[in-house]
Image (cartoon, rainbow, N blue to C red):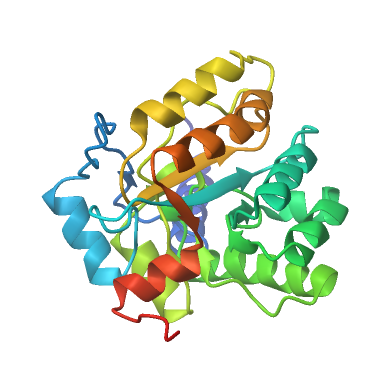
């Protein structure tokens, strides 16, 4: 290679490195993936000592009291596939509270449904604006994802802000939970989940129903995706049969109050 080209090459390498180092959205090193062994025979799952300790440190939650037959329903909505209205109808008919973790895309593309969620008394959770790998963002990048979502939510619905966050694909780290706390967000994971995010690969109502019933346990914090027709069709039967087994449904606000030792006065 001609030596006269070296200065330009070195300059190019320097610019690339500098751009990475000083990019406000530069990546973080650690990346954790949420996971646990599924519940069976109504015995709650355990995420393991390291995850339990990390979540406790930041007030993050993934299940409720393992002695109370309580269920917390949550749904992740990245985009609309035509099944959310049915889910909302079921929840309204059965008077069941839920939390919907939405993305910025969902806010702007399915605004009428978002407004209905709010009007029906459900909680809106923050699933980030652009659905990135949140653990791979800088502090500024994390803040931008959550606050852009909140700004758009307030603009469209009047809801001031969200307080519950869920990282896309369950990818997180200590820094994400810490920064979330600093900005007023509590992270919510889950103790019941199954493969239900493929809109084009329905497996039938019975598949979703059996997954939900087989993994059911006291303090269950359930994650479902609204793109699944299976979930929309199975939800009425699941609610009915879970109640027959003595379970009741509560909201994330109830879960947080319980975790902090706050009990309602009657």
- Quarter of the figure with the C terminus: bottom left
Q: Is 52 placed left or right of 117 in the picture?
A: left
The x, y position of residue 265, in whole percent, is 42, 86
Residue 166 visible somewhere in the drawing: no
The x, y position of residue 229, in whole percent, is 69, 25
Number of numbered labels in the structure image? 0
Task: Please give the name of the residue rendered at 65% of the width and 48% of the height, measured from the top-left corner.
Answer: 94
The x, y position of residue 50, in whole percent, is 15, 52
Residue 44 visible somewhere in the drawing: yes
Q: Would you identify the image quadrant in which residue 86 lies?
A: top right
Depth order, front residue of 77/108: 77
Task: Please give the name of the residue rendered at 61% of the width and 19% of the height, measured from the top-left corner.
Answer: 205
Task: Please give the name of the residue rendered at 76% of the width and 68% of the height, measured from the top-left corner.
Answer: 152
Depth order, front residue of 168/89: 89
Direction right: furthest residue: 112
Direction left: furthest residue: 49
Task: Please give the name of the residue rendered at 63% of the width and 34% of the height, measured from the top-left corner.
Answer: 236
Depth order, front residue of 92/107: 92
């Amino acid at each position: 290679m001609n030596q006269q080209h070296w200065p330009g090459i070195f300059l190019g390498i320097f610019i690339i490195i500098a751009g990475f180092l000083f990019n406000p959205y530069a990546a973080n090193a650690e990346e954790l993936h949420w996971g646990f062994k599924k519940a069976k025979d109504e015995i709650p799952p355990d995420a393991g000592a390291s995850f339990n300790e990390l979540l406790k440190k930041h007030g993050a939650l993934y299940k409720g009291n393992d002695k109370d037959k309580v269920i917390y329903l949550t749904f992740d909505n990245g985009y609309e596939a035509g099944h959310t209205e049915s889910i909302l109808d079921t929840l309204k008919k059965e008077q069941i509270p839920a939390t919907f973790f939405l993305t910025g895309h969902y806010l702007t593309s399915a605004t009428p449904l978002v407004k209905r969620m709010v009007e029906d008394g459900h909680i809106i959770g923050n699933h980030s604006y652009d659905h990135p790998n949140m653990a791979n963002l800088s502090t500024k990048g994390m803040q931008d994802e959550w606050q852009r979502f909140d700004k758009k939510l307030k603009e469209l619905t009047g809801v001031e802000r969200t307080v519950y966050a869920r990282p896309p694909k369950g990818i997180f780290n200590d820094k994400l939970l810490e920064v979330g706390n600093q900005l007023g967000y509590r992270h919510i994971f889950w103790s019941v989940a199954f493969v239900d995010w493929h809109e084009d690969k329905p497996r039938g109502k019975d598949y979703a129903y059996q997954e939900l019933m087989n993994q059911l346990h006291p303090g269950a914090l359930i994650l479902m995706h609204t793109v699944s027709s299976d979930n929309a069709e199975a939800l009425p039967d699941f609610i009915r049969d879970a109640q027959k087994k003595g379970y009741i449904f509560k909201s994330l606000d109830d879960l947080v109050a319980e975790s902090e030792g706050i009990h309602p006065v009657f």
